[in-house]
Image (tube, rainbow, N blue to C red):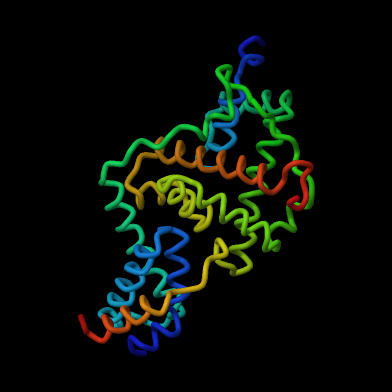
């Protein structure tokens, strides 16, 4: 039980993120589950990462660009590209 | 469709897509130009089974990845590890996260929230931002992101963990703090 109690949040947070990108080993899963049951802060962390990623996914599903961005190309750049496309220098 | 018409119809959208991922205006402008030039050359390959915009974004993605890879070969000063400052020497939280208030389902439609996300994202180091953009914004599988960025899975996991930790921390400070809900 001692190793579980001393399992630092740093490692739990790493696994909370890692499981989004790769399957955890069974021992990692078990230790993380125990940690999460005992640790309010890491549970909140996991929920927050979830909240952020869910928000990105909903935004993508709604057809919005990933982030609000500045106005588009400025006039000079637009003209430069036009000229290049016409075969100019 | 000719070059002028493409610039009118698509250049702004392509530019915004590139700017989010490359983050420097000049780089994004160059990527748009390269994309439209390549599209002009390859016009006959466009089969109309996707929209023209989708086809152009597909080309743009390749151009962006080429740039990111070229950048990655330039040695960079090691990114600071301050993202990991949240845990002290014991490896536990210095400021334990507290549950965020408010309805997470509504965030996606909240324009002010996304302005904060943009500001927080702008604060990420380049490599972390690129990894996060491909994995989370573009929702590509992790192995595909590794291939595109030409990095190992371990490398990717470290970058994503730092990016997520930093974004979370920034959003907590600038959006959810102190008592959650809207900004002060």
Count how many numbered circles sit on residues in the image.
0
In this rendering, the answer to whether B18 lies above or below B157 is: below
* Residue A40 x, y percent position in the rendering: 74, 29
Residue at 36% from the left image edge and 71% from the top image edge: B32
Q: Nearer the viewer, residue B36 or B30?
A: B30
Residue B7 falls in which quadrant of the image? bottom left
In this rendering, the answer to whether A84 lies above or below B144 is: below
Residue at 47% from the left image edge and 68% from the top image edge: B16
* Residue B28 x, y percent position in the rendering: 38, 65
Q: Is residue B65 left or right of residue B89?
A: left
Residue at 67% from the left image edge and 24% from the top image edge: A35
* Residue B170 x, y percent position in the rendering: 61, 44
Quadrant that contains the N terminus of chain B: bottom left
Q: Nearer the viewer, residue B170 or B97?
A: B170
* Residue A83 x, y percent position in the rendering: 28, 84
Q: Is residue B47 left or right of residue A32?
A: left
Q: Nearer the viewer, residue B181 or B67?
A: B181
In this rendering, the answer to whether A80 lies above or below B2 is: above
Residue at 66% from the left image edge and 47% from the top image edge: B174
């Amino acid at each position: 039980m001692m190793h579980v109690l001393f399992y630092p949040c740093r490692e739990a947070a790493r696994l909370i993120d890692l499981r989004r990108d790769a399957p955890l080993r069974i021992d990692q899963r078990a230790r993380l589950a125990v940690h999460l049951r005992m640790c309010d802060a890491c549970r909140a962390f996991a929920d927050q990462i979830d909240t952020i990623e869910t928000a990105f996914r909903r935004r993508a599903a709604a057809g919005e660009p990933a982030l609000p961005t500045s106005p588009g190309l400025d006039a000079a750049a637009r003209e430069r590209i036009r000229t290049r496309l016409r075969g100019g220098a | 469709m000719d070059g002028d018409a493409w610039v009118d119809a698509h250049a702004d959208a392509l530019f915004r897509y590139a700017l989010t991922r490359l983050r420097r205006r000049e780089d994004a402008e160059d990527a748009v130009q390269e994309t439209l030039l390549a599209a002009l050359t390859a016009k006959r390959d466009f089969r109309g089974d996707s929209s023209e915009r989708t086809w152009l974004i597909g080309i743009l993605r390749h151009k962006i990845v080429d740039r990111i890879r070229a950048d990655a070969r330039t040695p960079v000063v090691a990114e600071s590890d301050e993202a990991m400052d949240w845990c002290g020497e014991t490896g536990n939280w210095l400021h334990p996260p507290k549950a965020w208030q408010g309805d997470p389902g509504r965030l996606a439609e909240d324009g002010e929230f996304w302005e904060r996300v943009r500001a927080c994202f702008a604060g990420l180091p380049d490599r972390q931002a690129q990894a996060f953009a491909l994995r989370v914004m573009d929702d590509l599988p992790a192995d595909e992101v590794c291939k595109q960025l030409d990095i190992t899975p371990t490398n990717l996991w470290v970058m994503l963990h730092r990016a997520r930790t930093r974004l979370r921390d920034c959003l907590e400070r600038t959006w959810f703090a102190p008592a959650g809900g809207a900004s002060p």
